């Protein structure tokens, strides 16, 4: 993982990504017990092309020249499948901007705050997201006031109440 993070930091230094944060299952593992995850999700801002298009091609081309292979929507970087996910809505953009800097072994990186991770999972609401939300709520130190503010700003309060009602009954 350390080598993979160094490559991500190199992409940022070279301007191929403007800012990135670790999200998804790896971020959950940072805050709670390990969960099964296949890849490293990287939420990022990308430079805009001349026509206003956002493309991952420069990242794939650069990494390909470095010997890393593209496997579907992933790039295998130092043996870890990495999925680059451009910040696709206001919630994810805010999560990238408000991320926390951490150190993994000797490498600095940024990770989505637990409150934003919960909000993003609530927004996507896949079965694995619901399971991970329960894990985070049970094991992570979540600032509930911060979470409530995020949910309110992004119109997720009703979905949150339904989630809580469903799982508080079990």
Image: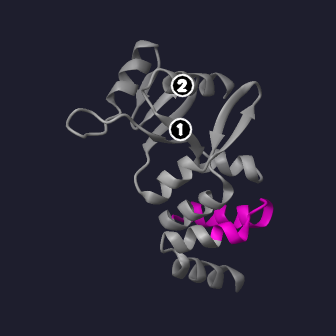
Q: Residue 133 or 103: which is nearer the viewer?
A: 103
Residue occupying the point 47% across, 52% down? 93
The local secondary structure at tag 2 comes to strand
Q: Residue 96 or 140: which is nearer the viewer?
A: 96
Q: Position of residue 150 (x, y in %)?
A: 58, 67
Label 2, residues with CA under 10 Å away: few <14, some 14-19, many ≥20: many
Q: Nearer the viewer, mark 2 or mark 1?
A: 1
Q: Position of residue 58 (x, y in %)?
A: 35, 25
Asked if residue 140 is among those painted magenta in the image, a careful observer would answer yes
Per the image, the residue denoted by label 2 is 77
Classify 64 as above or below 154: above
Residue occupying the point 52% across, 54% down? 94
**Region rendered in magenta:** 126-147
Residue occupying the point 67% across, 66% down? 146
Main secondary-structure element of the magenta-colored stretch = helix
Please give the count of numbered marks on the rendered protein. 2
Residue occupying the point 59% across, 82% down? 161
Per the image, the residue denoted by label 1 is 20
The reply to whether residue 40 is visible in this rendering is no
Looking at the rendering, in which quadrant would you find the N terminus?
top right
Q: Position of residue 65 (x, y in %)?
A: 40, 13
What's the distance in space between the residues labelled 2 and 1, CA to CA?
15 Å
């Amino acid at each position: 993982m350390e080598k993979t993070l160094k490559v991500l930091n190199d992409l940022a230094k070279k301007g191929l990504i403007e800012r990135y944060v670790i999200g998804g299952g790896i971020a959950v593992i940072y805050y709670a017990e390990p969960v099964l995850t296949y890849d490293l999700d990287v939420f990022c801002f990308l430079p805009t092309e001349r026509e206003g298009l956002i493309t991952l091609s420069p990242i794939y081309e650069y990494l390909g020249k470095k010997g890393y292979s593209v496997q579907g929507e992933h790039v295998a970087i130092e043996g870890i499948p990495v999925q680059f996910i451009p910040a696709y809505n206001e919630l994810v953009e805010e999560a990238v901007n408000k991320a926390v800097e951490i150190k993994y072994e000797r490498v600095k990186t940024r990770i989505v705050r637990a409150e934003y991770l919960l909000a993003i999972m609530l927004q996507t609401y896949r079965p694995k997201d619901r399971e991970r939300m329960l894990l985070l709520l049970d094991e992570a130190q979540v600032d509930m006031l911060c979470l409530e503010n995020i949910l309110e700003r992004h119109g997720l309060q009703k979905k949150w109440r339904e989630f809580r009602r469903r799982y508080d009954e079990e």
